[in-house]
Amino acid sequence: MRRFGVIGACMLLGACSTIIEGRHQQIVVNTNPSGADCGLYRQGIKISTVQNTPGNALIEKTKHDIWVVCVKQGYQQATYFNHSGAAGATFGNIILGGGIGWAIDSASGADNKYDSPLNISLVPAQSGVTEGPATLPNTYVGTASQPAAAAAASAQKESAIPNSSAPVAVAARPAPSDVSAPVEATPVASTPSASQSALDGQWLVELTLNTSRCPDAFSASAIFSGRKAEGSWGSLRMTSDGDVSGWVRVSSTIGGSTPTAQPAMLSGQMAQGVVKGTVSGGCLGTFRMTRS
């Protein structure tokens, strides 16, 4: 009976996300190693802090993305881009409440949701590499390519929401000046972005490393779902433009004579269906990703 009451309220008020999921969200932050301080930044302003990870932060949901910055003495600074996506109740709201309900949730921020939990790896400071700051910055604005990808994802989310009251525009076929002449088709501008399903699937990740005490090569099979791939080998994210970032776990003797797992940070871009980029952190080199 309670379940039907909630659904009935959604239908009457047209704001399912606000009722079911609320306007706030707990974001769990885990780091490897633990004991780091992490700040959550939105539009350059620090909105919450998680001290001595693991921990969680209660944040207000909005349409704006969040950058997570983690610091720990003896380690390089690590960042994580947390995109503001659509909450699950938003789609039920479209069915039950229609466009009015979505407008209510959109204004309140209840139709948005962030990734949680977050698993962030910090790279130990190595000889010859500047150690990261031990304290969190007061402000932080990301400079990577993710904001452009977030804008594309936001546009994709808004285009998926139907508006029954809006007229449907139909492109008119140009009338030829001469009935015997063929009609020239209007070219459609192509976009470099790919759909989520087109990028999902199995990819082969191959590293070529040139750092002493690191293996010469490393390979792993990554299965992407929702443009994310995670496993015992590491964690990777792919934007709608084909940009790839994340880390993989390689065995090295950087910390001593005994081989230990070290995170190798990856950053690359897709060109002609192949992702190529650089490897940073304790092990340096290049990597490529191909469909397998």
Image (spheres, rainbow, N blue to C red):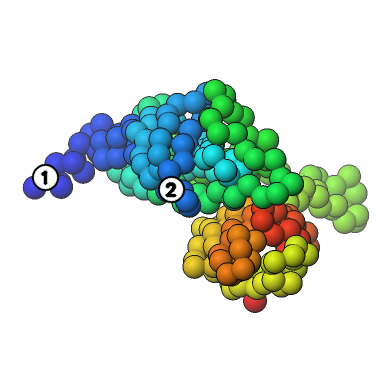
Q: Identity of the amino acid at label 2?
A: Ser
Tag 2 secondary structure: loop
Q: Position of residue 69 (x, y in %)?
A: 54, 37
Q: Which mark is residue 34?
A: 2
Most extreme residue toward the left is 1
Judge from the rendering whether residue 181 lies leftward or rightward of residue 266; answer left or right.
right
Label at residue 219: none
Please state which of residues 157 and 50 is positioned toward the viewer in this rendering: 50
Task: Between residue 177 and residue 203, name the one nearer to us.
Answer: 203
Which one is in front, 52 or 154?
A: 52
| 148 and 157: which is toward the camera | 148
Could you tell me residue 141's position as x and y percent?
61, 30
What x and y, as percent, mark residue 31? Answer: 46, 48
Residue depicted at 15% across the width and 46% down the height: 4
As drawn, the residue found furthest toward the front would be 257
Q: Which corner quadrant of the image does residue 138 belong to?
A: top right
Of labels 1 and 2, the one closer to you = 2
**Which residue is drawn at the image coordinates 91% and 54% (left, top)?**
181
Identified by mark 1, the residue type is Arg
Marks 1 and 2, how far apart in space?
41 Å
The residue labelled by disc 1 is 2
Callout 1–callout 2 Cβ contact below 8 Å = no
